[in-house]
Amino acid sequence: MRVVVEEEEMYPSTPGKVKVERSSSSSAAAAMWRQLHRCFASTGTMFLWALLLVATTATYLSFRSLAGGGGGGDATTAASRYFPAASWGGLHWERQIRSSASPRRPAGSAEGAGLSVLVTGAAGFVGAHCSLALRKRGDGVVGIDNFNSYYDPSLKKARRALLGSHGVFVAGVRYAMENPSSYIHSNIAGLVTLLEACKDADPQPSIVWASSSSVYGLNDDVPFSESHRTDKPASLYAATKKSGEAITHTYNHIYGLSITGLRFFTVYGPWGRPDMAYFFFTRNILQGKPITVFRGRDHTDLARDFTYIDDVVRGCLAALDTAGASTGTGGKKRGAAPYRIFNLGNTSPVTVPTLVTILERYLGVKAKKHVVEMPGNGDVMFTHANISLAREQLGYKPTTSLEMGLKKFVRWYLSYYGYNRGTLGFMNHL
Ligand SMILES: *[C@@H]1O[C@H](CO)[C@@H](O)[C@H](O)[C@H]1NC(C)=O
């Protein structure tokens, strides 16, 4: 969504518009995938493995960056010399993956056997939170991420360090290509690469992947329901997510892959994304810089169904737990497999000016607001999720109001960026 202009540049608050990404390197996706799968398939008693595609950006995998890119930085160079296919990161690397992928929850436990989950985009906002939550309840988790510079990569590195301290290994991988249409390559080509690998895997994993509320586009029938039309996207990003829903349906139909798509509604919270409005509003307000707030032609305010990260994480885990198995083997379908799509929203839209007012209160600083009319080709005015389907089938029940969620976000923000409690009296009420 495109709520704000900052420093004369459009900033989407979900990744809605064109953003050029610098990326490089070659791909060894399939080879690397086989290695990961081999590690997964041999983590002792293999119960069930699943794939959580929170971001599909991490698909064109480069082994070179895996071996040298930080987390996997101590992979032996000797090993890579003997494995010129560049698909193996060394003994230490493999041990880390095996250990990270092993569930800690025994088969006999009350919650059932642990999963082994591969999380793509694990150093991202939702990916990191999901990884921690899975790990906490005893599932095995391996993360991959391309650490692209869509926003400040230092935040992703900090999230990786946090995951590492909780026993979740995140392998760095790199984008294959240099292309301004990065959404096409991440959300379409990347997704297909993963689906191809999944359909060939034995056993096939169950797949839970992140779609987006942006697929509702110019639909003005609210609240948005999964059965509504989604053929009027308002951004290229939205169009790629809509394509993902069509593509995953194809793989479900042809190969029997179990697919669950989750339409996230403006997810926010601690460790969030700096390119989103609530995040850079906070930054600008604290720095005394102006913020730009869009308004409709008829002076209506933009509103979003802001959804707190912990609520979304519970929805993601419930989606994994109820996914149902894929049915195919050896690339052949053996029977019908589940194909599901759920809204994960909060069902209570809040206007952008209200968001600003809440931030002002927690920060103790008045925002310098520039109110600007929304351009005719701008983002949608309103999002509002109907979550009855997710409530019914996933037991999904968001409990965090924007007030409560922003309080937690601001507390994290001030601590992460080193604002001093002593000098900021307003923090007393956080
Ligand atoms: C929400 O969606 C369900 C179907 O999932 C539908 O039965 C219900 O009427 C919808 N609610 C509203 C308020 O549109």
Image (cartoon, rainbow, N blue to C red):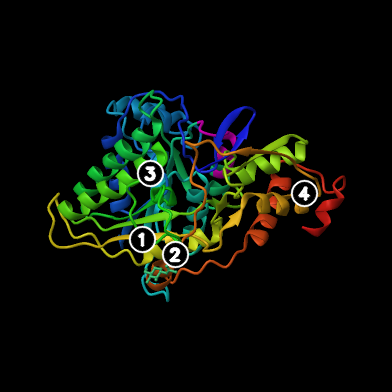
Which of marks 2 and 3 precedes in the sequence?
A: 3
Circle nearer the viewer, 4 or 3: 3
Is tag 2's residue or tag 4's residue first in the polypeptide sequence?
Answer: 4
Span colored in magenta: 149-159
Question: Is 34 drawn above or below residue 263 in the view shown?
Answer: above
Q: Position of residue 212 (x, y in %)?
A: 42, 50
In the picture, the disc for residue 146 is: none
Which numbered disc, 4 or 1, marks the residue that appears first in the sequence?
A: 1
Decide if ligand 1 comes within 8 Å of the CB at mark 2: yes
Quadrant of res 232 = top left
Q: Which residue is mark 3?
A: 233
Foreground mark, 2 or 4, reads 2
Q: Earlier in the sequence, mark 3 or mark 1?
A: 1
Name the residue tied to disc 1. Answer: 226
Taking 309 as reference, is 195 left or right? Answer: left
Q: Find the distance from the CA under tag 4 to the CA under tag 1.
A: 37 Å
Number of the label disc, if any, that sits on residue 363:
4
The question of residue 156 being in magenta is answered with yes
10 Å crowding of disc 2: few (<14), some (14-19), many (20+) = some
